[in-house]
Amino acid sequence: MQQPKALRDLIARTPLFTGLDAADIDAIAAAVRETRFDAGELIFSRGDKGQDIFIIAEGRVRLSILTSEGRELSFAQIGSGDLFGEIAMLDAGVRTADATAATKVVAVALSKAAYIRIAATRPAVGEAMTRFLCGRIRDADNQLESIALYPIEGRLARFLIAAAAQRGGGGNLVMLDIGMSQNDLALLVGASRPKVNAALSMLEENGAITRSGTRIECDLAALRLIAGNE
């Protein structure tokens, strides 16, 4: 199990719980339990009943769905500090996607019963969930807008800007480890792998990024110009 301070720090930097006071963080830390998954292990499947929300402490998780043709559509890879499983936990419905450990994963799980108990006595926790879900809706709207209105270079630029913002920190140059293949990236931005490869090359030629394997150094000012956010 994570050390108490490390656990509180993990919860405090999770987008859902950012900004909560120490007492609220302590209440959540006391209610979670540690879970571990091996690389390639299925954490849950689309259609499963869901009672837990997961916060990743170590490793990466791939979120995906199967198309009607049986092809896996990977739409996100998330890592330390990210969370998943909130929809089914909240509405008592079924999981909306498959979650698979892309690497060895250490996570903490918060059950629906524990969340309801905490939110009932700590209103700030419930308000934090509302803000978080509104942010998810805005992100989904922005992604749909990007696919509909922007060329592939603009979509990639907007994806990298969003990833840099999620990582946090200041400065114009941000190093990202996106932890996914070009095939996965293509699925995320609604394009083919060859088009993504060509677009990444274009971004690099324009000085907006510098690539080293899955690590990408981003010049945010240059990316914003390409993304149309100047």
Image (spheres, rainbow, N blue to C red):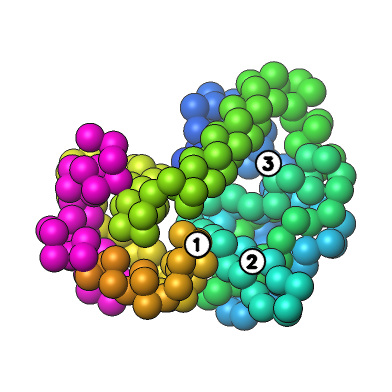
In the displayed structure image, the side of residue 50 where residue 229 appears, left or right: left
Which amino acid, by three-letter code, is at mark 1? Gly
Q: Quadrant of the C terminus?
A: top left
Residue 110 visible (yes or no): no
Q: Is residue 224 magenta?
A: yes
Q: Position of residue 39 (x, y in %)?
A: 58, 79
Q: Position of residue 206 (x, y in %)?
A: 13, 59
Looking at the image, is mark 3 or mark 2 nearer the viewer?
A: 2
Front-most of residues 107 and 98: 98
Q: Position of residue 14 (x, y in %)?
A: 52, 43
Looking at the image, is mark 2 or mark 1 nearer the viewer?
A: 1
Return the mark for residue 30: 3
Write the start and end of the magenta stretch as one range: 202-230
- Quick one: label 2 or label 1, which is nearer the N terminus? 2
Return the mark for residue 190: 1
Look at the numbered discs 3 and 2 and tell me whether their residues touch, using CB distance below 8 Å: no
Cα distance between the residues tagged 2 and 1: 14 Å
Residue found at x 63% / y 42%:
29
Which amino acid, by three-letter code, is at mark 3? Ala
In the displayed structure image, the side of residue 230 where residue 179 appears, left or right: right
In the displayed structure image, the side of residue 176 where residue 110 appears, left or right: right
Q: Give the labeled residue for mark 2.
A: 64
Look at the numbered discs 1 and 3 and tell me whether their residues touch, using CB distance below 8 Å: no
